[in-house]
């Protein structure tokens, strides 16, 4: 979808562009929220904790695969922007081959790693069996997640962001219905919750394939396109592997947090799982503003408008800070009530712990808001080193806080691991962006000319403030107006083709 972000009020443009991104992020979060509410209500706190105990292990393997397949869409977007349809088809074929190979590897070997991995994470014994079942079914259905993400990414790569969102929404609704049936009346336990997600994503894959077959001929891969070369595969891996490894770096931090929680007990795991689901919905708005800022900066940087970048980033920062204050206040005031929707009555300890984490996070959302905006701005300017460094800083800060503070202060210490990671990243981002801000002030300004572009978000897995994403911004070829000579020739051609009137002979 063509978007022009180089004209108009900066904060209005950024806010409007963030809305569809926000809807997509919220729908993504609803997958996990639905599972948590149904499992917590029907099966109890231990079952909810068992599902939560698998999160870091699933993120380590499936997150890598998700980031990998998201990166495969970058060459597709680049080829489509260059109007090279043959290259688009070759890119789709290469990405599909690599996605298929990765899916087979995960399906064959990942289920065997479920129990050893959970034991290594020191999962409490009372949670082990349910956690193993949930993880194994999720790994066995990994191919549905991978192909749905790959198909969604290549559809977005040609500028269509609405259709993947529609299919994702349908999958979420189907997932909610299946979870209620399989966990409730059918009594399949946590296995039903995992299977519902797999089946809903499988339906989404079929919908994507049918949509491409009927409506998107540019993505139709022909027989000769399947003859992918090593060069094609290497190029897709060159762009996909970094996004996969970014997800792995995030997963290492979640593993450390999971180990610290498992040592505390099932109630702490359940509380952290519940609070993370609620927190994810709140963070979705700030995350969307950050991604919209990245696109805004990228387009204005390419359009030679450093003045708009400077104004836009400042306005986006204030906008995000305002949203952070409102979201934080809502979590602090209503956090305990929201948590009770997940676990019901008789789980006061879980509610108290989860509410404490929401208070800690809500009070520090301002740091997270600055983090998303400034990191997005630097990414939009093409700076890769500082965002990467901040990711590593967050990893060490989150891991150290979870292990050290968790040992001394229990659940409260683990809950502080996220805000401390945010503060550590912001300390680096603020001076880095201020330098860029001053450099932008010395750059010449190109006369304001609208720049139609297709800004394509390639979004991978996320955990709190850690997001795996990339921005591909391609110019749109506008139809040229015919010259006077061309118009004259067209008139003469049409005149020659005009049928002559036949005269009637009167008799």
Image: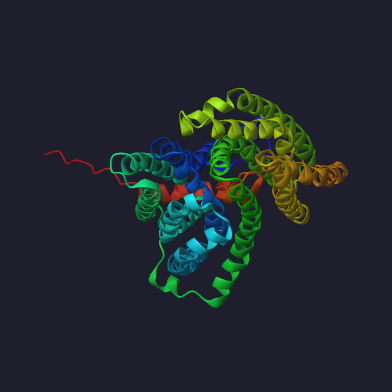
In the picture shown, does residue 327 fall above or below 445?
A: above
Q: Can residue 45 be seen in this view?
A: yes
Specify whether 24 is left or right of 376.
Answer: left
The answer to which image quadrant residue 244 occupies is bottom right
How far from the left and from the top, in percent, is residue 17?
Answer: 60, 37
Specify whether 180 is left or right of 154.
Answer: left
Q: Which of 94 and 27 is in front in this view?
A: 27
How far from the left and from the top, in percent, is residue 202?
Answer: 37, 53
Question: Residue reaching furthest left?
Answer: 507
How far from the left and from the top, in percent, is residue 147?
Answer: 44, 58
Question: Residue reaching furthest top?
Answer: 333
The answer to which image quadrant residue 324 occupies is top right
Residue at x 43%, y 59% (from the top left corner) = 136
Q: Is residue 80 visible?
A: no
The answer to which image quadrant residue 447 occupies is top right
How far from the left and from the top, in percent, is residue 223?
Answer: 38, 71
């Amino acid at each position: 979808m063509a978007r022009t972000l180089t004209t108009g009020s900066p904060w209005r443009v950024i806010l409007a562009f963030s809305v569809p991104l926000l809807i997509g992020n919220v729908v993504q979060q609803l997958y996990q929220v639905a599972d948590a509410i149904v499992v917590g209500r029907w099966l109890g706190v231990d079952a909810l904790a068992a599902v939560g105990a698998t999160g870091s292990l699933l993120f380590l393997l499936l997150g890598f695969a998700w980031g990998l397949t998201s990166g495969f869409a970058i060459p597709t977007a680049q080829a489509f922007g260059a109007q090279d349809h043959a290259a688009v088809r070759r890119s789709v074929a290469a990405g599909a081959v690599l996605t298929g190979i990765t899916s087979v590897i995960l399906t064959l070997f990942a289920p065997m790693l479920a129990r050893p991995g959970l034991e290594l994470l020191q999962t409490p014994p009372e949670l082990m069996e349910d956690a193993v079942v949930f993880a194994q079914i999720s790994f066995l259905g990994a191919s549905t997640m991978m192909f749905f993400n790959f198909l969604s990414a290549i559809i977005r790569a040609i500028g269509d962001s609405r259709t993947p969102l529609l299919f994702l929404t349908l999958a979420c609704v189907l997932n909610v219905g299946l979870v209620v049936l399989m966990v409730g009346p059918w009594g399949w336990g946590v296995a039903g919750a995992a299977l519902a997600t797999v089946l809903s994503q499988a339906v989404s894959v079929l919908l994507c394939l049918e949509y491409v077959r009927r409506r998107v001929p540019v993505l139709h891969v022909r027989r000769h396109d399947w003859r992918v070369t090593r060069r094609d595969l290497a190029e897709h891996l060159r762009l996909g592997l970094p996004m996969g490894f970014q997800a792995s770096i995030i997963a290492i931090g979640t593993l450390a947090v999971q180990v610290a929680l498992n040592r505390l007990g099932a109630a702490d795991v359940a509380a952290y799982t519940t609070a993370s689901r609620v927190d994810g919905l709140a963070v979705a708005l700030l995350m969307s503003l950050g991604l919209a800022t990245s696109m805004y900066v990228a387009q204005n940087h390419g359009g030679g408008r450093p003045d708009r970048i400077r104004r836009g980033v400042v306005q986006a920062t204030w906008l995000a800070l305002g949203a952070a204050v409102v979201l934080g206040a809502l979590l602090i005031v209503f956090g305990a009530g929201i948590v009770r929707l997940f676990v019901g009555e008789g789980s006061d300890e879980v509610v108290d712990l989860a509410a404490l984490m929401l208070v800690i996070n809500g009070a520090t959302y301002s740091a997270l808001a600055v983090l998303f905006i400034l990191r997005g701005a630097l990414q939009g300017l093409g700076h890769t080193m500082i965002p990467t460094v901040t990711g590593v800083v967050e990893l060490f800060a989150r891991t150290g806080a979870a292990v050290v503070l968790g040992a001394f202060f229990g659940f409260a210490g683990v809950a502080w691991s996220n805000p401390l990671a945010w503060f550590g990243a912001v300390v680096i981002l603020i001076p880095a962006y201020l330098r860029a801000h001053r450099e932008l002030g010395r750059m010449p300004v190109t006369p304001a000319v609208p720049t139609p572009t297709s800004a394509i978000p390639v979004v991978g897995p996320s955990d709190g403030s850690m997001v795996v994403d990339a921005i591909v911004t391609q110019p749109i070829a506008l139809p040229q107006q015919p010259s006077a000579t061309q118009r004259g020739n067209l008139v003469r051609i049409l005149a020659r083709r005009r049928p002559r009137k036949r005269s009637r002979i009167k008799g």
